[in-house]
Image: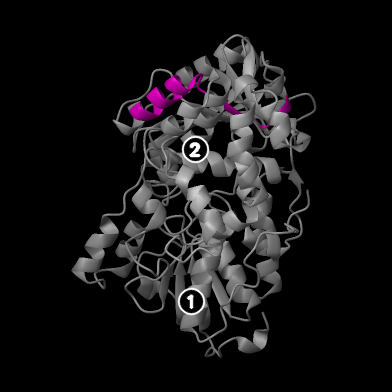
Amino acid sequence: MNASHAPASKPGSFDAVIVGSGPNGLAAALTLARAGCKVAIFEGADRLGGGCRTEELTLPGFLNDVCSTVHPLLAASPFFTHAKLAGITLKTPEVAFAHPLDGGRAAAVFGSVAETAATLGGDDRTYRRLLEPLVANVDAVLASVLAPLVAPPRHPLVMARFGLRGLLPVTQLARGLQTETAKALFAGLGAHSIRPLTEPGTAAFALMLGAVAHTVGWPVVEGGSERIADAMLAELATAGAQIHTGRWITDLDQLPSNRVTVLDVSPRAFLELAKGRVAPRRARALRRFAFGPGVCKVDWALSGPVPWEADACRRTATIHLGGTLAEVARSEADVAAGRHPERPFCIAVQSTVADRTRAPEGKHTFYAYCHVPAGSDIDMTALIEDQIERFAPGFRDLVIARHTTVARELERHNPNYVGGDINAGTASLRQTIFRPTITLRPYNTPLPGVYLCSSSTPPGGGVHGMCGDGAARAAMRHLGMPAEAEATETGGRAGPSA
């Protein structure tokens, strides 16, 4: 966007001030800075990036991502596609993800629908019927699901077909499947919703994540997820943005003079920053925003690759651990009921399968997390390792070091993860459509010129930058600037290099 559209700011003031530097805060800053706005960013932590940080959590030389590692939404996101950031190299495994079962078997998603369907026996035709139309129209569907769902869909017929199945619970979608393998595959995908698999809308997570696996894969970023934040910060520096770290903002009055403020914070944190400026009725609506379960995450440094029994598990970065559909559903139901599951469903990531830069020669990094009740301080390490040993006997013999983060600690690390909720808000059907409140302007707060851009806004969790981009465009309209999306489709996906 041409800088001539930018508003004129007073000396010592800013057109836009961003609070919080997760991927959405940085996306908002970058959209505004590229439009010619004078931008400042304030981050309370000593390092920027939020969920996109990489640290040596276990031992020197082992690079562990603090939160997100696998980035299908980054590869598919309209924001990142058109941001064309330098310094992000995506490494895509030949198998998008695998879901082991007892007896050395595994469900796995490969590059094409046909190749995957061929491994599912009697569910070959059903899998193709579910995924082929969605993969063929994935750009059209993404244009809607990565935008506020309250807006009219750009492709209503395509979205109607997707919605008919996506609104189902995973358990009901699975009724059309015959094999334990196919049912487990959809169970693992649906569990990314961090909801009971009997809940409406969980099928949408399963179908959409499966379709993206067949189009862009499930890649990792070479060198660690922090490279995403580094690339965005390099662009912001070029655009002249001011960046302040170690500056916790506790009141909006602490911010320098600005025309718009964009907050990469939760609705709860916004009310704390507003210090009573929000009318009681509007404040009550924001306080009703619900957060979901937390996660307990374990990082390991390993002396060798994980000894999976199933071959497909050795060829992917992402493993869904939980056994059958019934077992996964039971685990997620336990968590929703406030119980810690005895056999937790786990999402495990072995990034060194695709990116050998993350560990010393011959060594590997590995992590897994399971869902737990919100705010839990229970260490689930032993139960998580039991699930890994179930499908990879001898795993514990490879452990050189481990580092465990319980749900309550996650919130201390990142205040947006309330109770350890890495999605910054439960993905109930209501909060998938209306987020953070029932409104047609989801990024606007009750305060004029103040906007929310965290994952508590549409489209929710994930490293896609669309919450930040959406909030920035709402702010640009307030500034009287053209705010049309430069591109509304994901076709081409010419963003980070593959």
* Closer-to-camera residue (51/72): 72
Tell me if residue 327 is in the magenta stretch. Answer: yes
In the image, is 429 to the left or to the right of 349?
left
Q: Position of residue 7 (x, y in %)?
A: 56, 88
Q: Position of residue 175 (x, y in %)?
A: 45, 27
The numbered dot on residue 475 is: 1
In this rendering, would 347 be left or right of 87? left
**What residue appears at the point 46 percent right and 62 percent down from the top-left corner?**
148
Which residues are drawn in magenta? 315-333
Q: Earlier in the sequence, mark 1 or mark 2?
A: 2
Q: Is residue 455 visible?
A: yes
Residue 210 versus residue 74 in the image, above or below: above
| SS under mark 1 | helix
Q: Residue at x 46, y 18 (%)?
A: 383
Foreground of the two, 438 or 273: 438
Instruction: State the image quarter where residue 485 is shown.
Output: bottom right
Work out which quarter of the rendered image holds the N terminus and state it.
bottom right
